[in-house]
Image: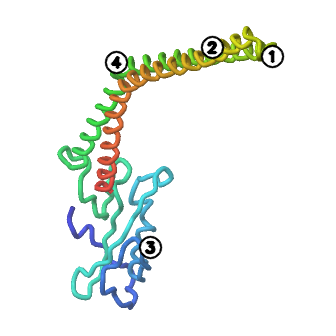
């Protein structure tokens, strides 16, 4: 684009104000009278100059007051990122980078992100991953079911033993002493059996879970890599 088409002139005499000695920080400063005058012009033409739908997506515009020749002031108009449908309105400084150019960093970055997404989807839908998750869930359900039924049986037996103990009033009677010993032993054996079932089931679940985690760790690593690259990619595209 011809540079002359990018340089705009003030339609009225510029205020007699002192010019900044240093370039101000663009995101936190008080604009001077010249910048405000240029900004008013942009606001007055913005809806006519572009087809961008500001109701759907906001857009940041800016102006840069310049001295194009000794004593001659003008200004440039620009916008952040890209407009709807990649519109390039006349009179505005275009994007520094053409994000739709085939070999641009933006397109190349998109290809990298697409590749990572494809890898993630391939892993997430891998038959071995799906099978591993089904096996783990089925084993977990079965394990929890066995533990629940075993606890129920232990509680039932415990209640029965309590009733039997209530009938054993003569603690010096050899037969009653023997019965009490058998009841105590039965209780201990049940607890040991329960712990064994729980331990063996947990060991089996751990093996099945590791088969699932092998895929999940790789998917998580790829998602993290994609998020980091996407963040950098977005920053460069702003």
**Residue drawn 21% across the image and 49% down it:** 105
On residue 127, which mark appears?
4
Mark nearest the camera among 4 and 2 is: 2
Q: Secondary structure at mark 2?
A: helix
Across the whole image, how many numbered discs are drawn on residues? Answer: 4
On residue 40, which mark appears?
3
The numbered mark, 1 or 4, whose residue comes first in the sequence reads 4
The answer to whether 203 appears left or right of 96 in the picture is right
The numbered mark, 3 or 4, whose residue comes first in the sequence reads 3
Which residue is more in the foreground, 50 or 216?
A: 216
Question: In the picture shown, does residue 40 fall above or below 61?
Answer: below
Q: Do the residues under discs 1 and 4 have CB atoms within 8 angstroms?
A: no
The numbered mark, 3 or 2, whose residue comes first in the sequence reads 3
Residue under label 1: 166
The numbered mark, 4 or 2, whose residue comes first in the sequence reads 4
Q: What is the distance, in whole Å, between disc 3 and disc 2 at their CAs?
A: 90 Å
Q: What is the distance, in whole Å, between disc 3 and disc 1 at their CAs?
A: 95 Å
Q: Quadrant of residue 135?
A: top left
The numbered mark, 2 or 1, whose residue comes first in the sequence reads 1
Residue under label 2: 186
The numbered mark, 3 or 1, whose residue comes first in the sequence reads 3
Mark nearest the camera among 1 and 4 is: 1
Mark nearest the camera among 3 and 4 is: 4
């Amino acid at each position: 684009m011809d540079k002359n088409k990018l340089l705009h002139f003030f339609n009225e005499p510029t205020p007699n104000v002192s010019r900044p000695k240093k370039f101000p920080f663009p995101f936190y400063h008080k604009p001077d009278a010249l910048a405000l005058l240029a900004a008013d012009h942009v606001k007055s033409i913005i809806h006519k100059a572009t087809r961008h739908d500001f109701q759907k997506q906001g857009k940041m515009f800016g102006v840069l007051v310049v001295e194009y020749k000794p004593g001659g002031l003008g200004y440039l108009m620009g916008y952040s990122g890209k407009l709807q449908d990649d519109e390039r309105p006349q009179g505005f400084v275009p994007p520094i980078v053409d994000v739709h150019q085939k070999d641009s960093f933006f397109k190349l970055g998109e290809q990298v992100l697409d590749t990572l997404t494809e890898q993630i989807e391939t892993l997430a839908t891998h038959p071995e991953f799906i099978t591993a998750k089904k096996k783990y869930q089925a084993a977990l359900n079965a394990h929890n079911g066995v533990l629940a039924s075993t606890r129920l049986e232990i509680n039932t037996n415990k209640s029965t033993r309590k009733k039997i103990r209530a009938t054993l009033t003569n603690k010096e009677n050899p037969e009653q002493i023997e019965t009490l010993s058998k009841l105590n032993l039965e209780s201990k054996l049940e607890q040991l059996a329960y712990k064994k079932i729980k331990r063996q089931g947990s060991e089996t679940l751990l093996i099945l879970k590791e088969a699932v985690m092998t895929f999940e760790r790789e998917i998580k690593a790829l998602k993290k890599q994609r998020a980091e690259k996407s963040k950098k990619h977005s920053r460069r595209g702003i």
